[in-house]
Image (cartoon, grey):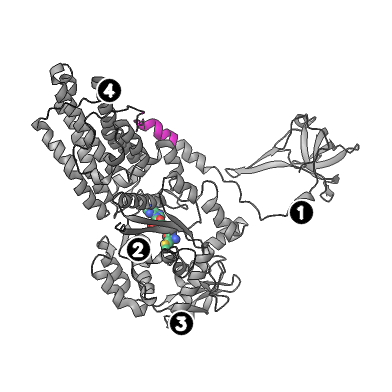
Amino acid sequence: MEEKKTFYITTPIYYPSDKLHIGHTYCTVATDAIARYKRQCGYDVMFLTGTDEHGQKIEEKAKAAGVTPQAFVDRIVTGEGGILDLWKLMNISNDRFIRTTDDYHVEAVQRIFKKMYDKGDIYKGAYKGKYCTPCESFWTESQLKDGKCPDCGREVHDAEEEAYFFRLSKYAKPVQELLESGSFLEPASRVNEMVNNFIKPGLEDLCVSRTSFTWGIPVDFDPGHVVYVWVDALFNYCTAMGFLNDKYDDYDKYWPADVHIVGKEIVRFHSIIWPAMLMSMEMPLPKKVYGHGWLVIDGGKMSKSKGNVVDPYVLADMFGVDALRFFLLRTFPFGSDGNFSNELLISTINTDLANDLGNLVSRTTAMVEKYFGGALIAEREADPIDDELVEMIRSTKGKYAKQMDALQLHLALEEVFRLIQRANKYIDECAPWVLAKDESKKPRLASVMYNLLEALRVSLVMLTPFIPQSCEKAFAQIGASGKAVSWEKAGEYGVLPANVTVHKGETLFPRIDMAKALEELEKREHANDAPKAKPVLPDVSIDEFARCDMRVCKVLTCEAVKKSEKLLKFTLDDGSGSPRQILSGIHKFYEPEELVGKTVVAILNLPPRKMMGQMSNGMLLSAVREVNGQEELHLIMLDDSVPAGSQLC
Ligand code: MSP
């Protein structure tokens, strides 16, 4: 048997520093559609995505959250609502997922770094910069704020830090040649940008190790240095295939990658630094780097600090995963920036999916049911009016494939929608409802219905990479299965059986009421503004936890403490037989009368504490949260049936 041709496609690996937004989703969904298309065409596809988990930013965020960097990234990658969950929700068909903290990757990167060092392409030098002594931090000139330390605002001084450098300058010429010949980097406009802005002014050697933080891959032959995060990250494309490690054995099969899909701001890393390092390693170069544009809002990039990030979970929940996937790839030319708006999203769904595609499916299946009881008769009668539609059924595949192969996803979809719109027009031209009135026109009516089903069949095959779940449902509705839904048959006419049976089902894409949906979105976006709960604190052992003696108590008396605005004085039955006095600063939230008789929870073995001259022997437990800058407190109260003295465990 002939071996399938391979196709290796990658997305960038994402930083797990915050939740991913619709811009990240755009990049992954686009790559997914290409991977699905290639599989359809018969390629043996390897689709890789993953997470880029090292670096100072992650180290700092973890510190601020009071957790280890590993715990921090684990939560964003594998936790509920995290990156893996998002890709599952968006129906991403990646074949592999790499995390740069995976052991096999770490070890392989150490070997790679050593190889380039042994070759003389990595050397030890000094990284010159500014130093803030109190913070013990190195800064570059551009990182300073008004010439001072961006962290503490104090004076900085010139300093040098020992660091390793990669001889990027040595590869300037071959990299320029690579960029200027053939189609290594696309769209072509990005080539000039790289050559003129970065190579021609002179490529400097690249600092590839750091000593000012520790969350990175250690340089194993020089403790104290960690590998620069981009060196670590870029090699993921090879280590995930098994390069210099035993975890996988697919490197020879898939490398070099057919295409790296990346956003425009990281084209520089992928089209200059990456090929230079591969040249140094004497490894084959990827065949293509495609730099797509950004999704922007009001012309600007989405960012958490601007507060304008769009949550894909909210949109997928409201409009459906396929509708969201479709919108992203139908609306914006892949190589350019696209201005995202909820209005555009809703109108695209209504026009293309509800109106054009959805209506064609529902009208066609409804008519086959109404006029033929669901199963077409085999007898048919052609008419010259069919010719244009039949020709489009045959020719759209070729035009679509040309655009897909050029990664012009929106233009590929344009071809499919031309066919769908033509089919809708054909319904009006043929007026099946008129034909249905005349029994002798049944064969003609059957022909019209058959042509519509065929137009739908080939359109759906081509839409499958974009809206896979909906196409599966639509295929069932139009009675198409097996070979008929294959890519191979997407350019043929006359594939469905003559007596094809339809099954009218649920509406695939209900029309969305724009005003109502916008209002709902507004609400949900504000719900997202609500403060997030604080991150989980570092682990305590079960023994440490067990030393906290927490018990159920009944409030016997409660009164305000004189001269104190905050304090309430409680006498509690803690089940021991003698009353216990506890003071609690919760007067702002409760009046004493409302608490008498309540069943509360207290920790009893805190050291006694004197407040406003009175002793407090323990502390009442409450749930606290900050909402819009205000503290909210809820005393923990249990059902009255729980007896005093019951222990919490
Ligand atoms: N970790 C690096 C990539 C290393 S690859 C060896 C990185 N990560 S990222 O999470 O910041 O970005 C991942 C991808 O998401 C990039 O391609 C980036 O362009 C893309 N996008 C982030 N915001 C985007 C938009 N608003 N619009 C489109 N894509 C965007 O960079």
Residue 238 position (above or below residue 519): below
Which mark's residue is nearer the viewer, 1 or 3? 3
- Element carrying mark 1: helix
Out of 221 and 36, give the one closest to the viewer.
Answer: 36
Location of residue 520 (image quadrant): top left
- Element carrying mark 2: loop
Give percent across and percent down for residue 77: 52, 53
Q: Which segment is the magenta one?
A: 505-521
Residue occupying image coordinates x 54% and y 79%? 221
Task: Tell me the amino acid under the disc marked 1.
Answer: Glu
Q: Earlier in the sequence, mark 3 or mark 2?
A: 3
How far apart marks 1 and 4 lie (CA) works out to 70 Å
Pointer 1 with pointer 4, Cβ within 8 A: no
Disc number for residue 257: 2
Task: Tell me the amino acid under the disc marked 4.
Answer: Glu
Crowding around mark 1 (Cα neighbors within 10 Å: few <14, some 14 to 19, many 20+) is: few
Residue at the spot of label 1: 544
Residue at the spot of label 4: 369
Give percent across and percent down for residue 471: 33, 38
Q: Which quadrant is home to the N terminus?
A: bottom left
